[in-house]
Image (cartoon, rainbow, N blue to C red):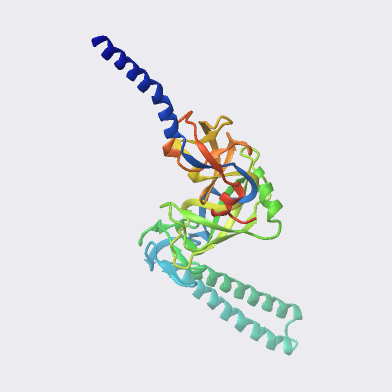
């Protein structure tokens, strides 16, 4: 009896052990969707580091020597064209102008007297010509003194924003001393460098049209107004292989300031790009992977290289071929070397249901 019980136990254990692998294999054989990468011409959003500049940003310098008598503006103030900003002590230049104007009056009187004598043939015509020349010289000197006096007033050459004040009221300034900077921020020029290969792709697709671009500001938010690439510089930088592009952005609210940084987002054509849905990927330690289904219906993880991100899609530059079968769903239900049953979904149908830039 005891021997019968032991035999029955051994048979039961063998049966349990023999049935377990079949049960496990049955559990992983769930039916999932599989697709393949799609090769297609598209457009990808590329980001470029950008420098933001005002369309006009100039230095305001003293044109005459003297004490700074008055400062009419403050730092960061918006000023209008022609507005008085600085006044350099004008007393010396006013005196010089008055002296020059007196010389004009004197020479004018001399000319009229000489004219009367010449009309009476008392003096030679040369004397009259010399009197006229002396008057012209005095008038020129008066005009020059007037210009020097005007230079004691520093006015805004255009509408703009005053930068830091480099001198304070009462300071002695010399000719050519920097007073402040003035920036016209009504529109902004944004410069960014484009590699040679991308420049060639861009020109082949956009030979005539200038594309709209977006500006991502330093806080990672997109600037509210799109810009337009208006010019490309003439020469490549031989050291970097880049060529500078310049985009112009409207700045009606004055949010952008001269000297800011950001990133330009521009659509660049991508020929024969290999596309897969983002949902078909998973990440391990900042690396992207997919599950590739082999001929034996078993899944194997494979690392891939992402060249660019589109909305819902990745452009794959390494790790996949068109004929590969990629697990589309149920990535969390499987692990390496699991055997699955699947339905193949046409890649064009899968990609078509996602958001893809038109070409």
Q: Let me know if residue 312 appears in the view.
A: yes
Quadrant of the rendering where the C terminus is positioned: bottom right
The vertical placement of 122 against 183, above or below, is below
Quadrant of the rendering where the N terminus is positioned: top left
The vertical placement of 46 against 5, above or below, is below
Residue 28: image location, x then y, percent: 44, 34
Q: Which is nearer the eye, 302 or 26?
A: 26
Residue 322: image location, x then y, percent: 63, 39
Q: Which is nearer the eye, 73 or 270?
A: 270
The vertical placement of 191 against 153, above or below, is above
Seen as rendered, the residue at the extreme left is 2
Residue 8: image location, x then y, percent: 30, 16
Left or right relative to 11: residue 41: right
The vertical placement of 151 against 357, above or below, is below
- Identify the residue at horizontal 62%, vertical 81% (top origin): 110
Q: Let me know if residue 270 appears in the view.
A: no
Q: Which is nearer the eye, 290 or 54?
A: 290
How many marks on residues? 0
Seen as rendered, the residue at the extreme front is 1
Left or right relative to 269: residue 336: left
Seen as rendered, the residue at the extreme top is 3
Residue 331: image location, x then y, percent: 45, 39
Q: Which is nearer the eye, 121 or 40?
A: 40
- Identify the residue at horizontal 47%, vertical 57% (top origin): 258
């Amino acid at each position: 009896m005891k021997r019968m019980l032991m035999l029955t136990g051994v048979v039961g254990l063998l049966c349990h052990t023999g049935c377990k692998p079949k049960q496990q294999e049955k559990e992983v054989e769930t039916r999932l969707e599989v697709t393949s990468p799609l090769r297609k011409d598209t457009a990808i959003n590329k980001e470029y580091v950008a420098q933001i500049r005002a369309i006009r940003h100039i230095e305001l310098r003293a044109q005459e020597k003297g004490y700074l008598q008055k400062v009419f503006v403050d730092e960061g103030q918006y000023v209008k064209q022609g507005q008085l900003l600085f006044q350099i002590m004008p007393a010396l230049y006013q005196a010089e102008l008055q002296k020059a104007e007196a010389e004009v009056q004197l020479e004018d009187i001399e000319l009229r007297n000489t004219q009367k004598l010449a009309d009476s043939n008392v003096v030679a015509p040369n004397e009259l010509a010399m009197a006229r020349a002396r008057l012209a010289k005095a008038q020129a000197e008066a005009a020059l003194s007037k210009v020097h006096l005007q230079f004691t007033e520093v006015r805004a050459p255009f509408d703009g924003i005053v930068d830091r004040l480099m001198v304070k009221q009462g300071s002695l300034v010399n000719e050519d001393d920097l007073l402040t900077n003035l920036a016209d921020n009504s529109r902004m020029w944004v410069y960014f460098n484009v590699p040679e290969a991308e420049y060639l792709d861009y020109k082949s697709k956009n030979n005539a049209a200038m594309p709209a671009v977006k500006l991502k500001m330093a806080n990672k938010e997109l600037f509210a107004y799109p810009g337009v690439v208006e010019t490309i510089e003439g020469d490549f930088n031989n050291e970097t292989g880049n060529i500078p592009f310049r985009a112009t952005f409207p700045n009606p609210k004055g949010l952008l300031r001269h000297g800011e940084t950001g990133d330009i987002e521009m659509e660049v054509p991508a020929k024969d790009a290999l596309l897969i849905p983002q949902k078909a990927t998973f990440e391990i330690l900042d690396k992207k992977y997919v599950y590739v289904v082999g001929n034996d219906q078993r899944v194997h993880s494979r690392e891939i290289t992402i060249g660019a991100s589109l909305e819902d899609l990745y452009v794959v530059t390494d790790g996949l071929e068109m004929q590969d079968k990629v697990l589309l769903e149920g990535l969390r239900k499987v692990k390496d070397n699991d055997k699955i049953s699947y339905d193949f979904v046409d890649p064009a149908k899968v990609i078509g249901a996602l958001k893809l830039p038109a070409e």
